[in-house]
Amino acid sequence: MAGDAGSVLKVSVWRSSGPGGVAAGDGRFETFEVPRQPSQTVLDVVTHIQRHCDPTLGYRFACRVGVCGSCAMVVNGEARWTCRTHVDKVAEGGRLEVAPLRNLPVIRDLATDMSAFFDKWARARGQFSGTRSRQEPFAVVEPQSEERRQVDLGIECIGCGVCYSSCDVVEWKPDYLGPAAMNRAWTLVNDVRDTARRERLAAVAGDAGCHACHTHMSCTERCPKHLPLTSAIAGLKRETTRALLRGEL
Amino acid sequence: MSPRAQAGLWFAQRMSAVVLAFAVVVHLATMIYAVRSGLSAAEILDRTRGNLPWFLFYAGFVVAIAVHLPIGLRNVIAETLGWRGRLLEACTAALAAGLLAWGLRAAWAVYAPGGA
Ligand code: SF4
Ligand code: SF4
Ligand code: FES
């Protein structure tokens, strides 16, 4: 195993260089040495640096078990969920480079401001609209139906932003909604209880929506939950086109 | 431009791609035939002048190009230069008009009896 006790990792960590270390824009990599441990994750490494080398290092995490989606960073050039990424899998020649997610403003060091990412979920009409009140019986969603199957494929998103950070179109077109917001819209388009289908399809159509996707599939490749994001977006293209031809868009 | 119109552009680009896939194959086959049979320019013109089906085919080809290419280029321009709104739409429309005019002129030139 590569994580032998006694060996040392060389870790380059992005540090933002605004007043008091806070701020976006410029920055530089700073190198730290971190002892290797068996089964060590990238988040363990970052935590070690903050606890033992430099307490001013800013980063974000919560659950440490791949549920909350708050710990994503760019590790050796690729966005990853750091709490579930083992150093053994990604360290090249005992080296790690850890940087904040791309396509989002940096708050400090490794922590990004994810507001724009989540605002886009709202813009993609990512809220459920139902008709029943809590006094009424539960709606029945047929588990074997094609719609429910589509929902199942996309529902496990943890909102980590890895896909958003990996998408070049987000970089080229900052108003592009991005894969996660559209995946959310796609799960709702397939929700048989939902009543806002028309508005949702209108919200995800066009240059800032599904029609901007180049089918690069970086999002699908990098999503830690292995969600089929590109095909969700293709589904939206199909449904918006149908709506367009019916005059419903 | 509304998202609805943008979705329409996307659809128009996909549909024109279907036409192009067919037209490019026919065009290439024709070119290869003409070259391999050693047809001279005069012999080619002899076959195209007054030939309405050929004219309609090439006119359709030109229309498909004039639809397909500007929409694709519109995306490239928006992504690389960051142009949006009026400037982008004007540029796209000018490109479409130019391609249509030049293309139809060329198709007409090989069709019109006596040349254009
Ligand atoms: S498939 Fe679409 S959304 Fe996913 S990375 Fe590529 S362009 Fe972005
Ligand atoms: S779709 Fe995947 S990569 Fe994107 S936010 Fe959700 S879990 Fe993360
Ligand atoms: S800390 Fe919650 S997903 Fe990594």
Image (tube, coloured by chain):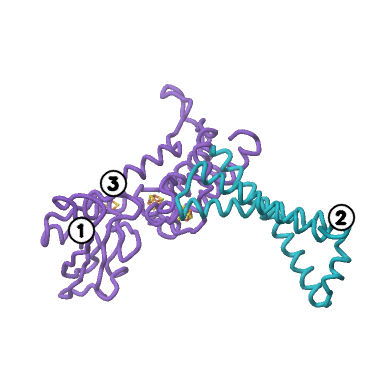
Viewer-proximal residue among A94 and A68: A94
Chain letter, disc 1 residue: A
As shown in the figure, which amino acid type bears the numbered disc 2?
Leu
Residue depicted at x 70% and y 58%: B20
Residue B89 at x, y percent in the picture: 55, 44
- Name the quadrant containing residue B99: bottom right
Residue A24 on image: x %, y %: 25, 51
Per the model, the C-alpha gap separating discs 1 and 2 is 69 Å
For mark 1, what is the residue?
A: A15
Chain shaded purple: A
In which quadrant of the rendered image does the C terminus of chain B lie? bottom right
Chain identity of mark 2: B
* Badge 3 density bin: few <14, some 14–19, many ≥20, Cα 10 Å: some
- Residue at left 84%, top 60%? B115
Q: Are marks 3 and 1 in contact (CB under 8 Å)?
A: no
Q: Which residue is disc 2 drawn over?
A: B52
Q: Are marks 1 and 2 on the same chain?
A: no
Seen from the viewer's position, the closer of residues A230 and B111 is B111
Q: Position of residue A53 (x, y in %)?
A: 11, 62
Q: Are marks 3 and 1 on the same chain?
A: yes
To which chain does the residue with label 3 belong?
A: A
Q: Residue furthest top?
A: A135
Q: Is residue A160 left or right of residue A212?
A: left
State the residue position of label 3.
Answer: A113
